[in-house]
Each structure stands twice: as C-alpha cells, then as structure tokens.
Image (cartoon, rainbow, N blue to C red):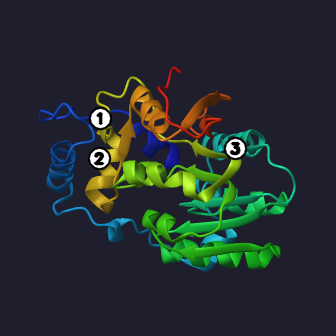
Amino acid sequence: AESDDALRRLFTTFHMDFPLPLPADPESADYRRVQMQLYEWLHGKPYASSNEVTSFDVAQAAQTPFPFYTRSAQTIGGQLIGIGHIIRSLDLPPGASVLEFGPGWGNTTLLLARSGYQITAIDIEQNFVDLISERARREQLPVHVRQGDFSQIRDIEQAYDAVLFFECFHHCADHQALVAALAAVVRPGGRVVFAGEPIADHFPMPWGLRLDGESLWAIRKHGWLELGFQESYFRDLLARHGWTVDKRVCGDTPWSTLFVATRTPDGYSRPANG
C-alpha cells in the first residue's frame, strides 16, 4: 500500500535457513524429493506448473506493464539497464532468430522485435501470451508468441540463433532436463543467455529453494517455484552438456548479471575449467 520500493525493502528483512538435511548428489531423485517436500510444506500443497499464473487486466497492463506500474526509478531504470545489456550481449546480426522462454510482460520480447530480430516467445501463462500479443499488435511488431511450459522445448523442430531465459529459468521444475535439451534448438555458433537469474556461489547448496523474504512470499502466496543455483554447479551442469559459460556483469542492478553459454568447438562435454 505504501509503495513497490517499500515492499522490496521489507522483503530484505527476512530469510529462513534451509531446515532439512540434503542428499549429497544434487542430481539424485532423493535430493529433488527433499526440495519438493519443503516446497509443499511452505505452499501447503504439491508443486504443479499450473501454479505459475499471474492475474491482471490485459488491457490495463498493455498500457502500463511492469516495471512501469511500480513508479520506481530504481526498478524501472534497473530493468531497462538489464534489457539493454541482454541485447548488447546477444550481439546478433539483423534478422537473427531468438527463442525466448518465460517472456512475462514482454518488454524484452518487443524490444528484440523492434531491433529487427525474429522472435518466438513461449510463456506458461495465457494472460502473458495475450498481453504480449496485444502489445505487439499496438506497436505493429511481428512477434510469434504461444502458451506452453519448458517441456515445449522437446517439440521444437526449428533451431535458433539464440535462446533467452530472463528471470524464468529458476521457475523450471526440471532444470537438468531443460539444459540437456538446449543443444537441439540452437544453431551451430549460437548461444543461450541466462539473464537476471539467481546464480551465485554464495547460494548455500548446489540448487534448491530460495528462502529469502521475497521468494518465501512468492512460494507461500502464489505457489511459484523459486529456485537458486550455485555458480559452480550451474557451470559444471552446462559444461557436461557441451557448453562453455561466460559471465557478464553490467551495473549494480539485479538484472545486469548474464551467463552466456556457447557450444564447445567439438560439441563434446568437458570440465567447466577445461
């Protein structure tokens, strides 16, 4: 009720330590089960991808989407810096094709389209699909957007010059399978960009639920899956599937840290420090 900035400040005043012992193998079924048991305790029922919904008026949001409705100079400016950093880091030639997962409000989607790229966007939330379609119609931009979850990657027959995850990879319930499927949808010489994702070596476990105030609120109230990743774990996972990872940081906004993955020249997996 006070402001979006006040809400974000309040979130920083609380966190919870992980309350359960974790199995040693982060790719084991037991490890995943412990994470999902904690999610169920926090939210009150088991996780389902159908929980990843956001209710809003599409017409109103088309006029004033996030971050603009926050009226926060820090939030608006930070996100615009982050989007500019993404476009610059993608460094694609005119007409290149981009597959964007979890586009949400569509700000990056529309700016990429306006920059002359061929954009396909997939979002699990029909409201966001409708919103992006309406915004693209108003701005007369060619954007192909459809409803679907991360598992849609297995049904994609086209290969793209780049794949983009902007604040969405951490909602994936099976991120390991998603990483394994990436090579099939990226052209030789292409790249995958992970932007604004909670990937940091100070994260207290290889991967798992984030238990800061904002994440706990999102899990408890909305049922969203809020994961975090140790940077070393994330790099090793990508390396085992034949990707090298370059970290690029611009500015002091949470949206300015990117991990840009490219295929190793021979296409084979190698250690992250290889």
Left or right side of 219 for 247: right
Left or right side of 222 for 268: right
Q: Dot 2 corresponds to which residue? A: 216
Assess whether mark 2 and mark 1 are in contact (beta carbons under 8 angstroms). yes
- Where on the picture, by quarter, is residue 112? bottom right
Q: Pinpoint residue 121: horizontal percent, then vertical percent.
A: 62, 67
Q: Dot 3 corresponds to which residue? A: 86
Residue density around tag 1, few if under 14, some if 14–19, many if 20 or more, within 10 Å: few
**Which label's residue is closer to the chain start, 3 or 2?**
3
As drawn, the label of residue 14 is 1
> Nearer the observer, disc 1 or disc 2?
2
Image point (16%, 60%), residue name = 44
Residue density around tag 2, few if under 14, some if 14–19, many if 20 or more, within 10 Å: many
Between marks 3 and 1, how big is the CA–CA gap?
30 Å
Amino acid carrying mark 1 in the image: Phe
**Which label's residue is closer to the chain start, 3 or 1?**
1
Between marks 1 and 2, how big is the CA–CA gap?
9 Å
**Which label's residue is closer to the chain start, 1 or 2?**
1
Q: Pinpoint residue 78: horizontal percent, then vertical percent.
A: 64, 40
Considering only vertical position in the picture, is 70 above or below 140?
above
